[in-house]
Image (cartoon, grey):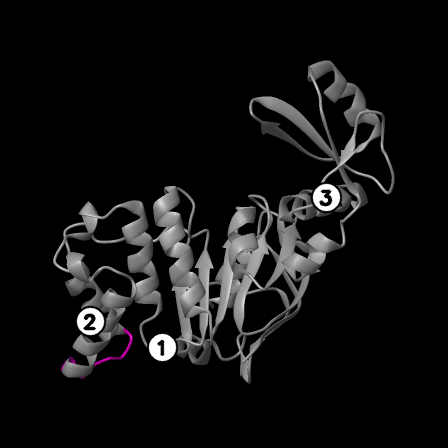
Amino acid sequence: MQLELEAVSKTYANGTRALDAVTLRIPTGMFGLLGPNGAGKSTLMRSIATLQSVDAGSLHFGEIDIRTQPERLREVLGYLPQDFGVYPKVSAWDMLEHMAELKGLFDRAARREAVTALLHKTNLWQHRSQRLGGFSGGMKQRFGIAQALLGNPKLIIVDEPTAGLDPAERMRFHELLAEISEDVVVLLSTHIVSDVSELCQNMAILSHGRVVLAGRPLVLTRELEGKIWQCFVDGSELETLSQRLDVVAVRRVAGRRVLRVYSEGLPAAGFEPSPPDLEDVYFHALAVAARSV
């Protein structure tokens, strides 16, 4: 099944336009939704997850009209929100079994089988009797995925899942997400570009509630080949060059400042061509979008 959004808009009571005619086609597999804080990512995730309504547009998952049939969407939805709370004094086993019952797994044997399988899948079986309050950040996120997978969902939404994780936990979480996305739609909302670069076959960039770029990460990166240049600069050079060049990003390499710019040809003396990456795609798209506002 495919998730289809057409001209989805949302304006809050205070006048903030969180979503502005968002149109996307999201196929099976991992889809990355990139954007800075305040871009509208969480609003879009919550709207798809039927936690809030939109003002205009259509949202469909296969034959399900999400706006008019939210209960049907919830039957096939798994959701890991940005702030996933747990009961600190409850064990992983007891909490997951309780949530399985809430999901409609009333048969005790079937419920225990499902809980056992998910704890193994998320590498939490050995911690099943441990209280959730004692879990690390990565373990809590893996538990969050376990509860999201209850009921064999066809659409899974994960909102900023790797924020705050150490590199080892982040890598384990990546492996888990990659595994579960093989035959379902997984919508990954994040501001971490490397998450999308490493995991997603398709992506979109959101800025001020609008889709400013969408496509395949590898294709979008390839389109910038020969157009990204870099140069080591000091503070005074940075200010001067930034005023007349199309700056993509300022990075640090071994403590030195590197200015990366977009240009069809040699932008200035001292610059060298550099292979583009998804961060260049992301920051260039945001810069172009900002100029059009």
- Rendered image: mark on residue 37: none
The magenta segment:
103-108
Could you say which quadrant of the image residue 92 lies in?
Answer: bottom left
From the image, tell me which residue sits under label 2.
116
Q: Nearer the viewer, residue 38 or 155?
A: 155
At x 64% / y 57%, what residue is drawn? Answer: 217
Secondary structure type for disc 3: helix
For residue 191, above or below residue 120: above
Q: Quadrant of the C terminus?
A: top right
Q: Earlier in the sequence, mark 2 or mark 1?
A: 2
At x 53% / y 75%, what residue is drawn? Answer: 66
Q: CA distance from mark 3 to mark 2?
A: 46 Å
Report the amino acid beneath label 2: Thr
Q: Earlier in the sequence, mark 3 or mark 2?
A: 2
Q: Is residue 80 visible?
A: no
From the image, tell me which residue sits under label 1.
152
For residue 274, above or below residue 175: above
Could you say which quadrant of the image residue 75 lies in?
Answer: bottom left
For residue 121, above or below residue 17: below
- Rendered image: mark on residue 284: 3
**Left or right: residue 5 compared with residue 245:** left
Q: CA distance from mark 1 to mark 3?
A: 38 Å
Secondary structure type for disc 2: helix
